Amino acid sequence: CTNISTLGDTSFIISTTNGGVNWNIQYTAPNVFFNSLFAINSSIVYVGGYDGDNNIYMLLKTTNSGINWVNKNPPSVPFDLFFLNQDSGWYCDNFLGPDVRTTTDGGTTWQLRNNGLTDNINRLFFLNYSTGWTGSRYLKKTTNAGLNWVQIYDFTTAEIYSLHFLN
């Protein structure tokens, strides 16, 4: 299990191996703001954020349970993450407008997938590589891996900050 905690101007990636009784700091990042986390399994974890001091977008990845972390240098801020496996995943940047991206090589390269999106995206959820949803003021769906997004609902005065579908 991996968790994110932000205290003051320093962010930490912490983990537990005993159900939360004890926590261990795995990564410390001064002046970094972590926004998102997605664990594939106990070894492979992605964490998204932004280094405010150096103006660096961050997508940290570990493949060895947090012993080492590598920044995959994404093209924008990973505000929310969703991965299907260790290679195929998505993120949205809530700060740059309609910015949704996908990778099939574990975060090394990213393709922009925003056709049909009109506003900042808060959350993502995918059932498989083809079918997914974005949440903001609008609920939008794709059935072709994000090549096109279709509006399902307009919440008018509310915003979506959590998404999950069973089918």
Image (tube, rainbow, N blue to C red):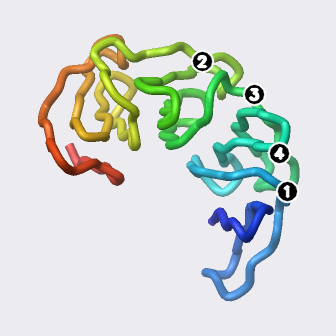
Asked whether the beta carbons under mark 4 and mark 1 sit within 8 Å of each other, the answer is no
**Mark 1: few, some, or many residues within 10 Å (few <14, many ≥20)?**
some
Of pointers 2 and 4, the one earlier in the residue sequence: 4
The CA span between labels 2 and 3 is: 10 Å
Residue bearing the label numbered 3: 73
The CA span between labels 1 and 2 is: 26 Å
In terms of secondary structure, where does tag 1 sit?
A: strand
Q: Is residue 93 left or right of residue 128?
A: right
The percent coordinates of residue 98 (x first, y second) are 41, 24
Q: Can you tell which of label 1 and label 2 is closer to the viewer?
A: 1
In terms of secondary structure, where does tag 2 sit?
A: loop
* Residue type pointed to by label 2: Trp
Q: Can you tell which of label 4 and label 3 is closer to the viewer?
A: 3
Residue bearing the label numbered 2: 110
The percent coordinates of residue 127 (x first, y second) are 32, 37
Q: Residue at x 51, y 27 (%)?
A: 96
Of pointers 1 and 2, the one earlier in the residue sequence: 1
Of pointers 4 and 1, the one earlier in the residue sequence: 1
Residue bearing the label numbered 1: 30
The N terminus: image quadrant: bottom right
Q: Residue at x 36, y 18 (%)?
A: 146
